[in-house]
Structures are given as structure tokens and as C-alpha cells.
Amino acid sequence: MFDFTPDPDASKAELYQELLSAADALTSDEPDGVANMANVASLLGEFLPDCNWTGFYRMVDGELVLGPFTGRPACIRIPLGVGVCGVAAQTGETQLVEDVQAFPGHIACDARSRSELVVPIVKDGAVKGVIDLDSPDLSRFDEDDRAGIESLARMLSDRV
């Protein structure tokens, strides 16, 4: 049994180091990508306060398809270039959105979401999927979150 409990007194940098260490422990020897996404989605939900949705969308036949997550039911398919996830997948660039209502074409899978961070998972120059984090708080995510989740996406690129 795994018990990864984040230190409530940790700085954000320390929190992300703990998250990466836990994700590495869970995924390093597991060849099944869906199992790895499921465990990491759970870790994200445990480690990141003030998030109402944490999870993955996978690239399947040129569109994003819902992967493992924690939170309310979500949109199942997202075309490239549509919404925050679709833009991140199409451009291969992280999308840090302080106010989703101001994002052109935002897809409101959960009306409670106010800010979002979406990080592409890239292997050999191709986007394999995205890590998606939503929060009910405006401006929940910052550059430290971006850096931490980008590090996680790099680590997972061979594991999902």
C-alpha cells in the first residue's frame, strides 16, 4: 500500500519535489500508461489544494479523449484548438489561464472552474496528451505551478 501525504508546511517548491518523487515511485516500474495516469491524477488531487479537477486527456486519432481524473464528470472528447486543453495540445505549449471566462472558446465542463493550467505531455516532438488542472479560484495557478507540472509532464512522457 502506498501512502503519500504531502507536508502541509512545505513550500510550493518542496511540495512539487514531493509530488514528483511520489509520481516517480508509482510509475517508474509500471508499463501501463492508463494505470500511471490514474495514480498520478489521484496524487495531483491529494497534493494540490484548491483544485476541483485534476487529470489527463489523451491524444487519440487527432483529438483529445478523457483519461483518468479526479473531480466531476468531464467532457469526453475535445478537438484540437478548442478550449484550453485543445489549444495546449495543438500548440504544444502550456496554457496558464487566470480567468477561464476570459479565454476565447473555453469549454465549461465544470461551471465551478475559474482558472486552469494545462500542460502538454510531449514525446519525440509529438503531443501524447495533456495534464489538466482546474480550480474554482481565480488566478489559482502561477509560474511555480507551471514549472512543477511541466517537470511532471517531462517525467511522464515515457510512462503514459
Image (cartoon, helix red, strand yellow):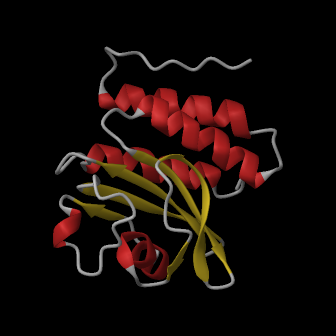
Seen at 19% across and 68% down, the residue is 101
Determine whether, in the image, residue 47 is placed left or right of residue 30: left
Give coordinates of residue 72: x percent, y percent: 46, 49
Seen at 40% across and 71% down, the residue is 93
**Which of these two is toward me, 121 or 71?**
71
Seen at 65% across and 49% down, the residue is 37
| Residue 85 drawn above or below residue 81 | above
**Which of these two is toward me, 76 or 40?**
76
Give coordinates of residue 1: x percent, y percent: 74, 17
Give coordinates of residue 54: x percent, y percent: 47, 47
Q: Quadrant of residue 51?
A: top left
**Which of these two is toward me, 18 or 124?**
18
The quarter of the rendered structure image containing the C terminus is bottom right
Q: Quadrant of residue 52?
A: top left
**Which of these two is toward me, 121 or 51?**
51
Determine whether, in the image, residue 69 is placed left or right of residue 54: right
Seen at 35% across and 32% down, the residue is 13
| Residue 32 drawn above or below residue 126 | above
Determine whether, in the image, residue 16 is placed left or right of residue 36: left
| Residue 138 drawn above or below residue 129 | above
Give coordinates of residue 22: x percent, y percent: 60, 29
* Number of marks present in the image shown: 0
